[in-house]
Amino acid sequence: MTTIFDPITIGDLQLPNRIIMAPLTRCRADEGRVPNALMSEYYVQRASAGLILTEATSVTPMGVGYPDTPGIWSNDQVRGWSNITKAVHTAGGRIVLQLWHVGRISHPAYLNGETPVAPSAIAAEGHVSLMRPITPLPTPRALELAEIGDIVEAYRVGAENAKAAGFDGVEVHGANGYL
């Protein structure tokens, strides 16, 4: 009988067990949304899981919607993540980067004053996460048709950067009104 502790192969990735660590947004990145030593320690401590799914990681500055979440669009971010993947692999772990663009689930405070973008100019229900006083989510700006390709390209670049940083794969976070 197969147990949670038995190895499994998913695609080309061999996992030592079937324990998958879910992605958990932690808001611990450094200035510039650069992954850091605290994040490395956190992931290394969990390297015995069969597979780690990282916290959601923005593919573009316009895809940010929470304070101090990491990114994967700059060289500094790629270097920060590379330090983490090396440490996790040294500890025997496997790690996949969760790619993210929050779309309308953001606020101009996280976007250098820019209005969040979405498929249509319809505000999501709820409030801006971790912002006080509690602030309703704003009405986003509807994407122009030509902008859609830019977001697709940001995901492509994010995936390439994840590969350069040494990740074992990527996952796209597409829930909750995200793009």
Image (spheres, helix red, strand yellow):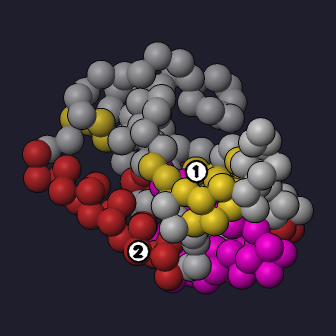
* Residue at image coords 80%, 81%: 90
Instruction: Give me the disc on residue 86.
Output: none
167 w.r.t. 6: above or below: below
Q: Amino acid at mark 1?
A: Ala
Q: Position of residue 108 (x, y in %)?
A: 45, 43
Q: Quadrant of residue 117?
A: top left
Residue projecting furthest to the left = 145
* Residue at image coords 84%, 61%: 48
Residue at label 2? 160
20 w.r.t. 154: above or below: above
The answer to whether residue 21 is seen in the rendering is: no
Q: Is residue 54 left or right of residue 65?
A: right
Q: Quadrant of the C terminus?
A: top left
Q: Position of residue 1 (x, y in %)?
A: 77, 39
Q: Quadrant of residue 130?
A: top right
Callout 2–callout 1 Cβ contact below 8 Å: no
Magenta range is 71-100
In this view, the mark in front (2 or 1): 2
